[in-house]
Amino acid sequence: MDRIFSGIQPTGTPHLGNYLGAIQNWVNLQEKYNSVLYSIMDLHSLTMPKEPAVLRQNVLDTTAAILACGIDPRKCFLFRQSLVPEHTELAWILGCLTNVPRLLRLPQWKMKCASQNNDGNVGLLTYPVLQAADILLYKSTHVPVGEDQVLHLELAQDIAQHFNKKYGEFFPVPKAILSTTKKIKSLRDPTVKMSKSDPQKLATINIADSPEEVVLKFRKAVTDFTSEVTYDPSSRPGVSNLVSIHAAVTGLSIEEVLHQAVGLDTAQYKMVVAESVIQKFTPIRNEIKKLQEDKAYLIKILEAGAEKAKELATPIYQEVRRLVGFQ
Ligand code: TYM
């Protein structure tokens, strides 16, 4: 049976990259598949230490945003990761099948250590093993993610195969599902991905940004010295990122948005893209605000989702325990 699993770190309200690279796909997939799980990855977020009160609030804000984007708890299980402790238990077992040099080679480890300017914590190194456990705990078959998670998914595939070889065929080898906009770039440096942790405030569009913030960020977006609007991601990454965003939020093709941009220079085009983003996210932003006022409702959704996720996870994890010799 096909089973969709994906997750997001609770960094507060998601950004445009999260939405276009993942959440928009999640909304479509919950319509097409019968077994779909989405998780707020609070265990993962401890790898970049946070104040407890901030973490608590971020989990609720991320949940409100995901619901506002159209995730429907009647069509999927939406849950908080740490409420299902089998994630960490399975991660331990899978960690014992994973070699350290493989983890040391993953770019996110290197990048995050460099950005923190320290040696990194153990959680940051073994985080992709926990990610493999998240997926395999439910015998998931498909994982909708952005391009930055593809190497982590390859690790999960390798771990599943390693487990199956050692203990007998058990886990499906999960496949990535990538959206057409699999990598949205920073508005300040179109050679890197848009990211919540970017220190440049103008680099990242948050889906709850006010129209004024959206206009300002697009106005300041880095492009190049050619004023015509064209799509060529390798030689014109800045303007091509704008074209990708425009196409993704309007649902038009690249050709159609380029057609709309004929006669505009990049400065004028930036305002067209800003307007399309404002139009797309104004209703979502209003819904986020409404949902944020009902904390009890958000907590109830996450707890109810966790109970259902646990029901799926328990027999699978019990079988893992038996296979490895704990029972
Ligand atoms: P996270 O929280 O960084 O991002 C959530 C989703 O958003 C995608 N994404 C992007 N897509 C396109 N362009 C961008 N600039 C961009 N930035 C982020 C990510 O690819 C992701 O799909 N490790 C994961 C969370 C996780 C997970 C899992 C995902 C934990 N366990 C199991 C899938 C399955 C993460 O930090 O995503």
Image (cartoon, helix red, strand yellow):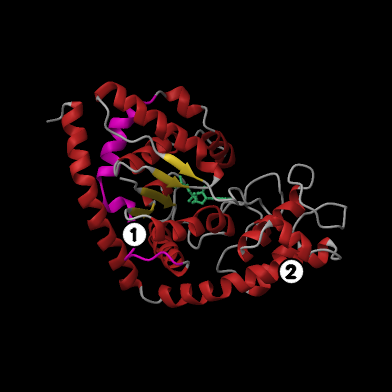
Q: Mark 1 falls on what kind of element?
A: loop
**Dividing the picture into quarters, in which one does residue 147 lie?**
top right
**Dividing the picture into quarters, in which one does residue 32 lie?**
bottom left
| Dot 2 alpha-carbon crowd within 10 angstroms: few under 14, some 14 to 19, many 20 or more | some
- Give the magenta-colored segment's residue range: 70-98
Image side of residue 241 versus residue 174, left or right: right
At 35% from the left edge and 31% from the top edge, which residue is drawn?
160
Asked whether mark 1 lies closer than 8 Å to ligand 1, one says: no
Three-letter residue code for mark 1 = Cys
Three-letter residue code for mark 2 = Val
Q: Is residue 15 above or below residue 191?
A: below
Q: Which mark is residue 299?
A: none
At 15% from the left edge and 29% from the top edge, which residue is drawn?
326
Say which residue label 2 marks: 272
Asked whether mark 2 lies closer than 8 Å to ligand 1, one says: no
Say which residue label 1 marks: 76
Say whether residue 227 is visible: yes
Q: Mark 2 falls on what kind of element?
A: helix
| Dot 1 alpha-carbon crowd within 10 angstroms: few under 14, some 14 to 19, many 20 or more | many
The quadrant the N terminus occupies is top left
Q: Residue 5: x, y in percent?
A: 38, 49
Q: Does the magenta portion include 92?
A: yes
Q: Residue 143: x, y in percent?
A: 43, 45
First reached walking from the N terminus: tag 2 or tag 1: 1
Image side of residue 113 versus residue 56, left or right: right
